[in-house]
Amino acid sequence: MDLFRKKPLAIPQNTGAEKLSKTLGAMDLTMLGVGAIIGTGIFVMTGVAAAEHAGPGLVISFILAGFACVLSALCYSEFASTLPVSGSAYAYSYVAFGELLAWVLGWDLVLEYGVAAAAVSSGWSGYFQGLLEGFGIHLPTALSGAYNADKGTIINLPAVVIILLISYLLTRGVKETARFNAVMVAIKISVVLLFLVTGVFYVKPENWTPFLPFGFHGVVNGAATVFFAYIGFDAISTAAEEVKRPQRDLPIGIISSLAICTVLYIAVSLVLTGIVPYQNLNVSDPVSFALRFVDQNMIAGLISVGAIAGMTTVLLVMLFGQTRLLFAISRDGLLPQSLSKVSPKTHTPVRSTWMVGGLIAVLTGFVPLDRLANLTSIGTLFAFLVVSLGVIVLRRTKTDLRRGFKVPWVPFIPLLSAAACGYLMYNLGRETWIGFLIWLAVGLLIYGLYGYKRSNLNTKK
């Protein structure tokens, strides 16, 4: 059995109805990245991470997580500019390490994007229902949350509806999706800036004391937790086949979106813990709560609108990344070929989009989604670690490749990136590791029973 057969470095040339449309530029990619990154992390997880892990030292947690992401972003940029195809880390690993690890990584990314979308849609539903209640509208209890016999909830209807609406939007075409995303990103960036401008006048420096109430270990745990907040920039690379100038625009989109979001995260965490004592921040809407804490109720309401817009764009990019990932895996024969069929009218993989949307709608609608953030984080960290090592492998095995962007100081930077990701993975809990390993075991079973025999590399022998 040749489990490590590698794909050639040729870029797939789809023709006619099977061709994805090249319509995205650097600004579109930057907006997609910001749309994916700023959402649940800034509007929800900042409070939990401060209250339970890092206290005011949350700002250091964001810097540590951001540092790991910057290193990984450099590695992603080199791969994306060298091999501009759909599939992101899955496609890169297929070339660098071979089919088995590529499948493991692809299956891992299915977990990352799917669980992230389900978790974010649950948070979206909470903010949306809060907004409705502000207007005196209350959903029936049975329709307000995933199944819970004690609470009387049966289905999280708003979460299901938003997933299906975004799935419909994704089937209309990538340029239409990018336009909608840009509008939502503008709204949420404006709201974040409004929070910073308003909140800075209510900061009390004494709230930053003690700065590290849980010690440096708490800061590291906080970094592993808030890493979920940075997930998304890697999804940009899944759009590679729909970018006009991928060698130039992909690195710009990846690095610029990450830089923008890191600055905003640091600023928000400083202002947030300066307004409210960290012990009080374990709430579902910490940013709005902070403004209500200082009697800025009207602006707090606007923050809720921004949070809804923010999480909408995260869902949009997560579902987009998931469909392009399945498109790439299916085209290689490791999943049914029907998932790589592209609509001749909209040039989008309609069938895989509705399949992904339907499955995530069921997951978020009926299954309680506690602790999913850490499961998403470990999947992403694993992908970042493999991509970082892949840069070193490809530099040594394919020295003559044309690279639109090159990571500096190889192998030092990729090794540092891999070490940082590995360290954050180590600091995630035992339950997270068990869930991750079970998911990978299921994936290996599917590959053994289906993917290995039907792989394009196997049928071409």
Image (cartoon, rainbow, N blue to C red):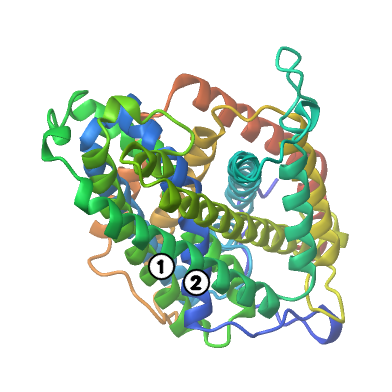
Q: Position of residue 453 (x, y in %)?
A: 81, 49
Give the residue type at disc 1. Answer: Ser
Q: Is residue 315 above or below residue 433?
A: below
Residue with the mark numbered 2:
31
Answer yes or no: is residue 125 visible. yes
- The answer to whether mark 1 and mark 2 are in CB contact below 8 A is yes
**Is residue 461 something that shows in the picture?**
no
The total number of labels drawn is 2
The structure residue drawn at horizontal position 49% and vertical position 72%, both measured from the top left corner, is: 31
Residue 296 as seen in the image, left or right of residue 89: left
Where disc 1 sits, the SS reads: helix
Residue 272, image quadrant: top left
Q: Quadrant of the C terminus?
A: bottom right
Q: Amino acid at mark 2?
A: Met
User: Between 12 and 162, which is closer to the camera in this rendering?
Assistant: 162
Q: Position of residue 56 (x, y in %)?
A: 22, 36
Taking 147 as reference, is 149 above or below it? Answer: above
The residue labelled by disc 1 is: 257
The quarter of the picture where residue 456 lies is: bottom right
Of all residues, the one furthest to the top in this rendering is: 150
How far apart are the two marked residues, 1 and 2, measured between alpha carbons? 7 Å
Give the side of residue 267 with respect to residue 4, left or right: left
Which x, y percent locates residue 174? 69, 75
